Image (cartoon, rainbow, N blue to C red):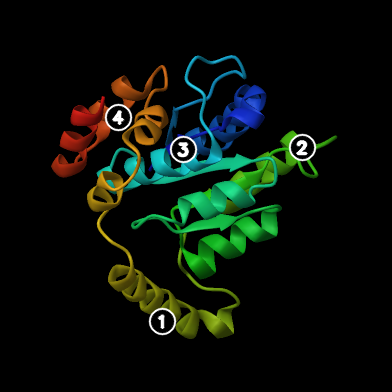
Amino acid sequence: MRIALINENSQAAKNGLILTALKNVVEPMGHTVDNYGMYTADDQAQLTYVQAGILGAILLNSGAADYVITGCGTGEGAMLAMNSFPGVLCGHIEDPVDAYTFAHVNDGNAIALPFAKGFGWGGELNLTYIFEKLFGFGHGQGYPKERVEPEQRNKKILDQVRLQTLRPLTECLEHLDPDLVRGAVAGEHFRELFFAHAADEAIINYIRKII
């Protein structure tokens, strides 16, 4: 699995800490982490949580990433921004139980974390335990065991509902302010990471046009 890390500007200073915790957990499992920044609070390319959602949607829908880790001060804005787009199912995760149940019940492809609210002493340990529960036990098996069949059935129903209620990503992007989208993909390492792994030609062509 290719996992993308995205930090918006208010919590960019924590990028290195988050990256270390994520890589320490998932790389021994055989996963790969791509760090899309922001890397520091002083980066030239400044991402809002809305732009983090745009970037996350581009990565997931294009195949450049299989999973996105993002967040903001509370995690709420980043979660709402991510869920504004097709092909994204983002959970708001505060603790390891959230991570485990989201992986098994909701089987999404992105999480938004609170990187300021409640992030004090032991914050990096909480991140480690969240990533262990999110990636270490599979996805979509349902929870608890007596609810496996209805949980899996409900997830399939939700996927079909979202297919009918959300437009294709390229159509969504075409109706957004081009400068907003351009800013979302202006990160220092975006081009080298995105074009090396993206597979959806329509999205690739749109990105080439916008940048």
Residue 136 can be seen in this image: no
The residue labelled by disc 4 is 194
Q: Nearer the viewer, mark 2 or mark 4?
A: 4
Seen from the viewer's position, the closer of residues 6 and 155 is 6
What's the distance in space between the residues labelled 2 and 4, CA to CA?
Answer: 30 Å
Classed neighbour count for the residue bearing mark 2: other residues with Cα under 10 Å, few (<14), some (14–19), many (≥20): some
Of the two numbered discs 2 and 4 on the same chain, state the one appearing first in sequence.
2
The residue labelled by disc 3 is 51
- Decide if residue 103 is on the left or right side of residue 179: right
- Disc 2 marks a residue whose amino acid type is Gly
Secondary structure type for disc 4: helix
What's the distance in space between the residues labelled 3 and 2, CA to CA?
Answer: 25 Å
> Where does the image place residue 6, in percent across and percent down from the top left?
50, 34
Q: Are marks 1 and 3 in contact (CB under 8 Å)?
A: no
Residue 166 can be seen in this image: yes
Secondary structure type for disc 2: helix
What's the distance in space between the residues labelled 1 and 3, CA to CA?
Answer: 32 Å
Q: Which of marks 1 and 3 is in front?
A: 3
